[in-house]
Amino acid sequence: MLGRLLRGAVAATAQQAQRCEQLMATSGRLLVAAETASAGTPNLGETPSDCDRGAACSVPGLDVVARTGSNSLASTSLRCPGDSRGHSTGPSSSGSLSTGLQLQQLRAFGYLPPKPRFHLPERISAIVQDKIRAHQRAKPPAPEVPPLGPRPLQDSSLRVGCIATKAGMTQEWDEHGVRVPLTVLWIDECQVVGVKTHEVHGYTALMLGSGHKRQKCLAPSQAGFFLKAGVPFKKLVAEWPVSPDALLPVGTRIGGAHFVAGQRVDVTGWTKWRGFQGVMRRWGFKGQPASHGVSLSHRAPGAIGNRQDPGRVWKGKKLPGCMGNERRTVHNCLVYKVDASRNLVYVRGQVPGPAGRSVFLRDSRLANSALRATWGVPFPTHIPSPEAAAAEPAPGDVTAALPDPASVGVYRNPADPYRMYREETDYFQGITWKKGD
């Protein structure tokens, strides 16, 4: 009920204010017309433009009659003393009047001044402000995020992931001489930029930002979000669902030490863009024969219909079209090596997407809690010591010294892949291995 009363009062006040503004503008123009007429320089060609709709007045030397109503533009008339002819004003003169005023404002100010804002009456404004304050007081306060520090890893704990950039692929040989293909992922200034809690948002999550972007390339709302959070402008922002005991304060950095060698991760990326492709490359069709009556249709899909029942092409039919740029997730990838000083994570195998594309890293969802407990991952994240934090190079400093190879964590495979050939077969019997052979 109160809302209906407020809306009705606001609408009535707005209409009244609009009518007052029209009357004030009309009276001002009529005064100018009266001064011109009293000076003895009446101009019949310009007199109609001095009178506005929505009012009725009497000026010495002029008889201006303006009827209020919806058709006031067509009913306004002006008569001069001693002249029986009446000069009626129509919509064209009103339009020319408004256009002329706009041109004068453009010449004087260089731009059109903004329209005056409508202000509510004091009583209604006070009621609205009281309602807003009451609504703000009724909102529950945002819970405080626990301070950054090591916490015990529970079975239900869910750590945050990170945003990385695919730098490319390389290869290494393990202690058994087996070649291992590796994908290099670079974590570029990944920080916590937002916290979402169950009390306020209905779920628990962390917002991470990565990279750097100039302020002029951001929308005002986006720039204001980063300024309010007190973090640098980020190129990419993503959200990770976490458990309540894995929340981190805003500004916490997620680096390469967040992962350890030997653990399993899920990597989400976007496949390479292939453009418009046919069915043989897009869906792996066999194609049609090279002979036996086939001409100019060797790579065509063939028939796609189903006669008169149903008499149409089924939805989802595999046909030519755009290929690539689709979200894909590779599960249970092995973290082979971690270079924490340079924020590099080496993952065994391939990762979807071209080099330079952003990917999302997270702990593998296929591993149970007992297996995750054996990885030894830091929870909720790696917290550097004050000495190590002070010794870290500045962001973007490429002149920093290379890290000590001994400090780089590498996965060691205890299983020898050649053991089965040595012990279970006679392939190597009678062969003596010598250096240089």
Image (cartoon, rainbow, N blue to C red):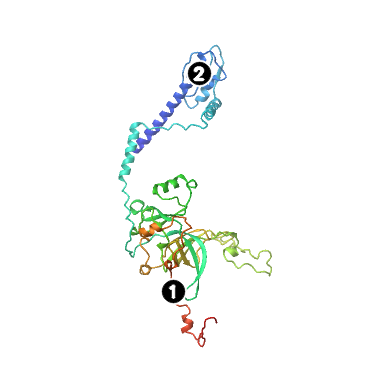
Q: Tell me if label 1 and label 2 are in contact, CB under 8 Å.
A: no
Question: Quarter holding the C terminus?
Answer: bottom right
Closer to us: 134 or 79:
134
Which callout, 1 or 2, points at the residue further toward the start of the chain? 2
x and y percent of residue 153 in the render?
33, 64
Q: Which mark is residue 206?
A: none
User: Would residue 241 be visible to someone looking at this image?
Assistant: no
Give the amino acid type for the residue marked by disc 1 in the picture.
Asn
How packed is label 1: few (under 14 Cα within 10 Å), some, or many (20 or more)?
Answer: few
Q: Identify the residue shown where x is 40% and y is 56%.
A: 253
Q: Nearer the viewer, mark 1 or mark 2?
A: 1
Q: Is residue 225 above or below residue 182?
A: above
Q: Identify the residue shown where x is 34% and y is 31%.
A: 122
Q: Is residue 113 above or below residue 56?
A: below
Helix, strand or loop at mark 2: helix
Q: Which mark is residue 413?
A: 1
x and y percent of residue 261 in the render?
42, 67
Closer to us: 299 or 245:
245
x and y percent of residue 365 in the render?
41, 65
Q: Is residue 393 above or below residue 6?
A: below
Q: Which residue is mark 2?
A: 33
Helix, strand or loop at mark 1: loop
x and y percent of residue 254 in the render?
41, 58
The residues tagged by marks 1 and 2 sit, at their Cα atoms, a distance apart of 98 Å
Asked which quadrant contains residue 321, the reply is bottom right
Please state if 316 lies on the left or on the right of 129 as rendered. Answer: right
Closer to us: 353 or 430:
430
Give the amino acid type for the residue marked by disc 2 in the picture.
Ala
Q: Identify the residue shown where x is 40% and y is 68%.
A: 367
